[in-house]
């Protein structure tokens, strides 16, 4: 699972040595110029982008996220690798300005409140499918509204953005991560990691610090199964190995699906409520783009 952790706030250390600062200023000017202007000729034409939203679940009844817009920054130059070291946080802060190489496109999502927990166990929603300039997609910018909330134990709580945080998330890609399922037809899935994105402080207030992963079905595998006595066991499924961890909240009927897994060998922990006993299944092999089925699992007391 290729992880991309969205960090709205970047902090840079200041240095107080004048000569070094002067050299640094010159370097920054040259760097910014290289990223803003390109001598390479642009790619002609367009491509189609389909952007899907899915959910890595957390332990809540509902998670309601206010999404205002989604824009993509396309590098239309032929040699996009020259821009790998650009300051994309700076470029992402101003989506109203294009230059000779980078072009912003609003993909025209339906703005509104999305209940992310409806998008679990293999369910997703098509945010938008639109035509964009041909080239490498380098940024996905998601603008968030303020009408965010969650429901826990049947009680609704507001979810705030941290003070001084940006009201947007930047997801950085290099342009090759997308699934070109037909010539000029690209798609990618964004997995909103609820468990890592919702933080509760000591005062009880919930804050939204969005964490996204992105994946394509061709380049990732998934694990599915069914817990026979889920209605009583109320189990949570954790899939992990030395480098990755993913979660699933089975449906009331016990079905679960975990997608966006890298090739590898995993353990599956089924954490059940009393009197049921936790169960671990080891040596579960995942190989993209295949689906690994664990079949029906009956938890013991």
Image (tube, grey):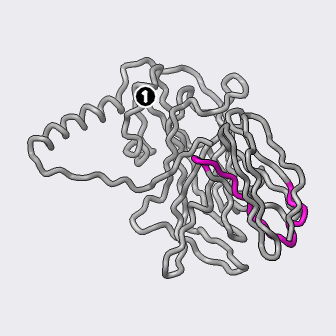
Q: For residue 264: magenta?
A: no
Looking at the rendering, the stretch of residues picked out in magenta corresponds to: 226-244
Kindly tell me whether residue 123 is visible in this rendering: no
- Residue at the limit of the structure toward the top, as seen here: 41
Q: On the picture, is 35 further left or further right than 2?
A: left
Q: Quadrant of the N terminus?
A: top right
Vertical order, 113 against 53 (above or below): below
- The spot of residue 52 in percent (x, y) is 69, 45
- Point 74% across, 65% down: residue: 271
Vertical order, 168 against 32 (above or below): below
Q: On the picture, is 140 further left or further right than 56?
A: left
Vertical order, 80 against 234 (above or below): above
Q: Nearer the viewer, residue 124 or 200?
A: 200
Q: How many residues crowd mark 1 within 10 Å: few (<14), some (14–19), many (20+)?
A: many
- Residue at mark 1: 101
- Circle 1: element type: loop
- Point 30% across, 35% down: residue: 32
> How many numbered marks are there?
1
Q: Quadrant of the C terminus?
A: bottom right
Q: On the picture, is 103 further left or further right than 123?
A: left
- The spot of residue 3 in percent (x, y) is 56, 45
Find residue 263 and report its image quarter.
Answer: top right
Q: On the picture, is 288 further left or further right than 294?
A: left
- Point 13% across, 40% down: residue: 22
Kindly tell me whether residue 142 is visible in this rendering: yes
Q: Nearer the viewer, residue 255 or 286?
A: 286
Find residue 214 and report its image quarter.
Answer: top right
- The spot of residue 273 in percent (x, y) is 77, 73
Vertical order, 159 against 174 (above or below): below
Q: Nearer the viewer, residue 55 or 138?
A: 55
- The spot of residue 87 in percent (x, y) is 37, 40
Q: Nearer the viewer, residue 186 or 249?
A: 249
């Amino acid at each position: 699972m290729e992880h991309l952790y969205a960090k709205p706030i970047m902090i840079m250390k200041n240095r107080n040595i004048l000569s070094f600062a002067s050299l640094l200023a010159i370097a920054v000017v040259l760097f910014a110029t290289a990223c803003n202007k390109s001598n390479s000729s642009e790619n002609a034409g367009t491509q189609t982008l389909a952007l899907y939203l899915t959910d890595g679940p957390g332990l809540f009844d509902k998670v309601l996220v206010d999404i205002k817009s989604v824009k993509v920054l396309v590098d239309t130059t032929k040699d996009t690798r020259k821009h790998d070291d650009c300051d994309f946080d700076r470029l992402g802060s101003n989506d109203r300005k294009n230059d000779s190489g980078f072009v912003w496109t609003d993909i025209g999502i339906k703005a509104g409140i999305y209940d992310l927990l409806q998008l679990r166990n293999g369910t997703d929603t098509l945010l938008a499918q639109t035509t964009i300039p041909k080239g490498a997609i380098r940024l996905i910018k998601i603008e968030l509204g303020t009408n965010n909330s969650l429901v826990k134990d049947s009680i609704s709580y507001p979810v705030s953005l941290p003070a001084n945080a940006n009201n947007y998330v930047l997801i950085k890609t290099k342009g090759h991560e997308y699934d070109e399922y037909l010539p000029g037809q690209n798609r990618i899935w964004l997995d909103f990691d609820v468990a890592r994105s919702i933080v509760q402080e000591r005062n009880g207030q919930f804050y939204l610090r969005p964490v996204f992963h992105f994946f394509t079905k061709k380049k990732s595998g998934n694990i599915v199964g069914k817990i026979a006595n889920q209605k009583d066991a109320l189990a949570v499924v954790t899939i992990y190995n030395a480098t990755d961890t993913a979660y699933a909240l089975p449906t009331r009927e016990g079905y679960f699906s975990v997608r966006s897994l890298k090739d590898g060998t995993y353990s599956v922990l089924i954490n059940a409520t009393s009197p049921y006993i936790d169960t671990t299944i080891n040596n579960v092999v995942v190989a993209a783009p295949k689906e690994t089925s664990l079949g029906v699992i009956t938890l013991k007391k």
